[in-house]
Every structure is written in C-alpha cells, then in structure tokens.
Image (cartoon, rainbow, N blue to C red):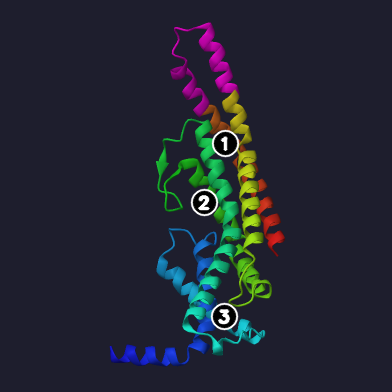
Amino acid sequence: MEFLQIIGDVVLKNFAYVFPVMAIFARVSLLAFMLPGLGETAISMRIRLAISLMLTWLLAPLVVKSGANIGIQDWGMSRMALGIGLEAFHGFVLGFSLRVMVYALQIAGSIISQSLSLTQVFGGGMTSEPNTTIGTLLMLSGVTLLVTLDVHILAFGLLVQTYDIFPLASTPDLDKLAYWAAGKSMSVFSFAVALALPFLVLNFIYNLMLGFLNKAMPQLMVSFVGMPFITGAGIVLFSLSIGSILTVWLNSYQTHMAGLY
C-alpha cells in the first residue's frame, strides 16, 4: 500500500506529463475494442488491453514529437478528465467508422434468415448478443477477410493521421459528426438490404406462389409443403451467392476505407 501511495503521489505531481499518455491510451483502447478482428468478444479482454498499451507506447512519441503542445500545465484535474473523455470519444468515432460496415453483414444475415424462415436458429455469435447462424457466418467470413488483408495495420495508420484532424484533447464538431454518423448508418442499412435482395425476391415469389396455391387448394396445408422448399432453395441460393456477397462487401469496405483516409 505504501508503494502504491508513493506511485500515486508521483503521478499526481507530474500529471501534466502523464496526461498525454493517458489520453492517447483512451483513444487507442476505444479503437482496439471496436476494430474488426481485434474487437471481437472471442478475443480476451487482457489481450486487447495489452495491445492497446503497446500501441500507446508506439504512438506517444509520434504525437508528442509532432508538436502536440496543448498547454496542459495550466489545466486543472477536471479539464484533464474532460480531455481524456474527448479522446475516448474520438477513438469511439474512429472505431465506429471501421466497424459500421461489419454491421451490414449482420443486418444482411438477419434479413436472409428471415427470408428463409431460419430466424429461430440462434447461437453464440461474434457479438455480445446472439445472432442467427447465417449472420454469424457472414460476419466471421468478413472479419477473416479483413484480418488477412491487414486492415488492422491500415487502421493504425489511420489512427496516426487522426491527430492531424482531431488534435490531442480537441473538441469535435458534433453537428458534422452526427450528420456523418446518421448518413453512414442509413447507407449501411440500404447496402445490407441490397446484399440480401436475391433472398427477398425469392421470399416474395414464394409467398406469391403460396397464395395462389392456397386459393386453388384450400384444403392443402401449404405451409407444411412450402416451408421445406423455401428453406432448401434458400440454402442452395446462399451457397451459390456467398462468394459474390463477400466480394461486393469487401470492395465496398475498401472504398469506405479509402474515403476515411
């Protein structure tokens, strides 16, 4: 306890020098916890924290050397705490911008499962909440593609560049960020619907045929006849189109990354 008290006194007396490291760690850790591949729930919390600390020590000399003199010697503890909160917000925005395209696969998987009458098949997914089997398969395939293409290295390069746009402990333009986040969320949802469009068309044709068949033969239990058909035909269509879905999604993700740069 005495050792911790001594360390605490030293840190408080030299908090102006410790603050930049803590602020950088706040931005890096939020990015690491949302980055595709590294931010998955299957990765241990300790591993993500260790990677965040190592990235902080790599990034701290670059940020401090680049002239990030923000005059924190005159700051109080409350202002420094606010600065760390702003840094965490910057990391969240960057992590969201890299993570939002993965949500498109999750939404597309939910739509496909709904079209194939497989929404009741839930399991342990890559997120904290359970997902459908098709959604988990799409997300796992997409994240695997991103990791093999070294997106985590590109994300670190993008993190370094963010200090030119959002300097250390700077206040962001919330109006522009809110407009960008809303527009990106709408575009991601429409993109997810476009990925699942063949299955929506198949589901529409299936229900149309089922309606005609029910009118022609009211005594026939059309749901027992049609459900195996829509599930089997949908699985065949999914096995034929999953390569194209992932290719289109990966090209869109690369365009999205280029826009961030």
Q: Which mark is residue 140?
A: 2
* Kind of residue at disc 3: Leu
Give the image location of residue 149, x and y in percent. 62, 60
Report the residue at 50% width, 70% height from top: 29
* Kind of residue at disc 2: Leu
User: Range of the magenta residues?
Assistant: 205-231
Give the image location of residue 78, x and y in percent. 48, 79
Q: Which residue is mark 3?
A: 58
Q: Which mark is residue 83?
A: none
Give the image location of residue 214, x and y in percent. 51, 11
Res 216 → quadrant: top right
Instruction: Name the element at disc 2.
Output: helix
* Kind of residue at disc 1: Phe
Q: Is residue 211 left or right of residue 187?
A: left
The nearer-to-camera label among 3 and 2 is 3
Report the residue at 55% width, 55% height from top: 143
Q: Is residue 206 above or below residue 174?
A: above
Estimate the spatial distance between the alpha carbons at disc 3 and disc 2, rounded to whole Å. 29 Å
Estimate the spatial distance between the alpha carbons at disc 1 and disc 2, rounded to whole Å. 15 Å
